[in-house]
Image (spheres, rainbow, N blue to C red):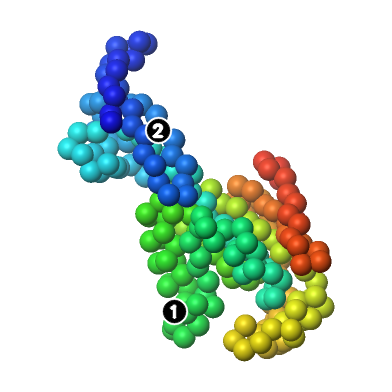
């Protein structure tokens, strides 16, 4: 249903539409019906008819998509945290799922673009230890107007080595890989472009999440 009314302040006709997208909150605002293009997410401009597939449309729709970026050592609890907190609402992207791909970064970017392009939130479940590793992801999320949220898994090297030792099969990684990641791990900062940063710690098999919104912060 697309109710049309007139804006009392301008007298111009407006159309309001509400769309439901799974696992996504949609905000709709009215714009004049004769508009030919609209600015979406403050990044790109699209023909208004393209948004809903109608010959004539006058709706600007903002999707509350998230690009969630995990940061932390191997065996710090990232994948378990995803299963507990995000499996029902977010797409899962991890280089562990395509280890044999010759260009894992390109494949990862493609999966993120596919999800965000369809209006679905995404979790990037990798170590992402340096600002350089995170920069491309933050930029990609920004292109699609996604809210960028970082989760920093604050676990000591000793803790991760102990957890890794208890793993079996392909889930276990060489200890040298954990040492290598620890050497280059840089805690994230909001100055990198995150909209929100949260710290995750595992206590007695339960996750504790802390963080502050809208504050300049280095975790």
Left or right? Give the position of 126 relative to 20: right
Viewer-closest of 197 and 188: 197
Q: Quadrant of residue 3?
A: top left
Where disc 1 sits, the SS reads loop
Q: Position of residue 151 (x, y in %)?
A: 66, 58
- Bin the neighbour count of mark 1 within 10 Å (Cα to Cα): few under 14, some 14-19, many 20 and up: few
Q: Position of residue 160 (x, y in %)?
A: 76, 76
Above-or-below relation of 73 to 187: below
Above-or-below relation of 186 to 147: below
Question: Disc 2 vs disc 1: which is toward the camera?
Answer: 2
Q: Position of residue 107 (x, y in %)?
A: 42, 73
Left or right? Give the position of 128 relative to 45: right
Viewer-closest of 7 and 180: 7
What residue is pinned by disc 2? 28
Q: Residue at x 43, y 39 (%)?
A: 26
Left or right? Give the position of 105 relative to 81: left
Q: Position of residue 23 (x, y in %)?
A: 47, 50
Viewer-closest of 3 and 123: 3
Q: Quadrant of residue 1?
A: top left
Q: How many marks?
A: 2
Where disc 2 sits, the SS reads strand
Q: Residue at x 48, y 61 (%)?
A: 91
Marks 2 and 1, the one that precedes in the sequence: 2
Q: Residue at x 66, y 87 (%)?
A: 168
Left or right? Give the position of 43 relative to 48: right
Question: Is residue 138 in view?
Answer: no
Q: Residue at x 59, y 70 (%)?
A: 126
What residue is pinned by disc 1? 103
């Amino acid at each position: 249903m697309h109710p049309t009314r007139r804006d009392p302040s301008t007298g111009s006709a407006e159309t309001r539409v509400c769309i439901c997208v799974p696992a996504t909150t949609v905000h709709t605002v009215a714009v004049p019906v004769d508009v030919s293009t609209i600015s979406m997410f403050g990044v790109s401009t699209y023909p208004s008819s393209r948004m809903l597939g109608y010959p004539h449309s006058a709706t600007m729709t903002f999707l509350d998509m998230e690009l969630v970026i995990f940061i932390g050592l191997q065996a710090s609890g990232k994948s378990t945290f995803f299963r507990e907190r995000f499996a029902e609402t977010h797409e899962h992207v991890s280089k562990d799922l395509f280890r044999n791909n010759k260009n894992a970064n390109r494949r990862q970017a493609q999966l993120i673009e596919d999800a965000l392009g369809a209006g679905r939130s995404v979790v990037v479940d990798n170590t992402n230890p340096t600002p350089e590793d995170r920069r491309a992801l933050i930029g990609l999320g920004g292109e699609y107007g996604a809210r960028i949220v970082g989760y920093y898994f604050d676990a000591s090297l000793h803790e991760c080595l102990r957890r890794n030792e208890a793993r079996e099969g392909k889930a276990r990684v060489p200890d040298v890989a954990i040492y290598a990641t620890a050497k280059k791990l840089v805690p994230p900062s909001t100055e990198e472009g995150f909209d929100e940063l949260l710290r995750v710690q595992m206590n007695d098999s339960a996750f504790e999440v802390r963080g502050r919104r809208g504050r300049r912060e280095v975790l």
